[in-house]
Image (tube, grey):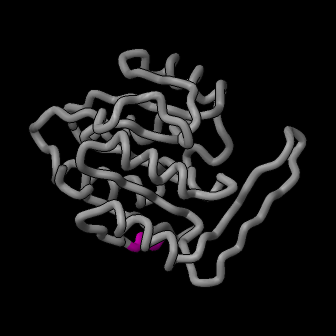
Amino acid sequence: MTHMGEEYRAAHPSHMVATERIAALHQGVPFGMLDCGVISGVTYRHLLAAGLEVDYTGIDIGEAAITDCRRLYPEARWQQMSITDLAFRDGSFDVVNCRHVLEHLPYYETAVRELFRVARRTVVICMFQVPQESEVLLRRETANGYIWLNRYAAGPFEALLHSLSESVEVIDVPADHRRNQIYLCTKHSA
C-alpha cells in the first residue's frame, strides 16, 4: 500500500535537516529512537541512508501504516499506539521524534508531555502547520469520521517546550511547497 504524498514527504528538506541534527548527536554511537507517526517508514529510511546505528521503534495509530512498515522493514520494531498514551517506561529512548502528528490532535499538551517522559535526552518535533500567534483549531469531517488540522499559537506551545527543556532550538525549514519548523529540544538533566 502506498500513502498519498509519500514521495513528496520523503523528499521534504525537513527530513534531511532532522536526520543531520540527530546524526551530529549520535554519529558512530548506537542510540535508541522512538519515532511517532511513521506513515511509511520514511524517517527510518533516512536514518539508515545516513548510516546511523539506531535501535528503532516506530509507532503510528494507523493499523495500515504499521502493517506496511513491518513488511518493508522487518528488522525494526513497529507498534500501533497513540502518542497520548505511550506504553514505554520513563527515559526509554535517547531520541524521540515526532513529525507531523501534533497538528492532527485535538490538543497537543498530553502528547508533548508523553514525548518528554519517554525521552532520555532529546526530543525532535517537526510541525508542518507552523505555530503562529493566531491559533486555529480545525476539525474536518471525513468518510471515516473526522480529522484535526490545527495551527497552534506559538507562545503557549513554545512555553511548554521550554518548561520541559534545558534548551530549545527552533529551526525554520523553508521548502518549495510547505514551510516546516523543527524544535530540537534537550531535556533538563536528571
Residue bounds of the magenta highlight: 172-176
Instruction: Return the residue nearer the eye: 23 or 166.
Output: 166
Q: Is residue 75 left or right of residue 84?
A: left
Identify which residue is drawn at 58% across, 76% down: 153
Q: Is residue 180 above or below residue 61?
A: below
- Residue 96's quadrant in the figure? top left
Q: Answer whether residue 177 is visible to the viewer in this image.
A: no
Residue 51, x across and y down, in percent: 21, 36
Residue found at the far bottom of this picture:
133
Q: Answer whether residue 83 is visible to the viewer in this image.
A: yes
> In the rendered picture of this protein, how many numbered marks are placed on residues?
0
Residue found at the far left of this picture:
28
**Please, what is the dominant secondary structure of the magenta stretch?**
loop
Is 173 within the magenta? yes
Instruction: Return the residue nearer the eye: 153 or 129.
Output: 153
Identify which residue is drawn at 42% across, 57% down: 125
Residue 130, x across and y down, in percent: 54, 71
Is 90 within the magenta? no
Quarter of the N terminus within the rendering: top right
Q: Is residue 74 above or below residue 34?
A: above
Residue 111, x across and y down, in percent: 52, 49
Identify which residue is drawn at 40% across, 73% down: 172
Q: Is residue 36 left or right of residue 49?
A: right
Residue 24, x across and y down, in percent: 16, 53
Identify which residue is drawn at 54% across, 51% down: 110
Residue found at the far front of this picture:
190
- Residue 66's quadrant in the figure? top right
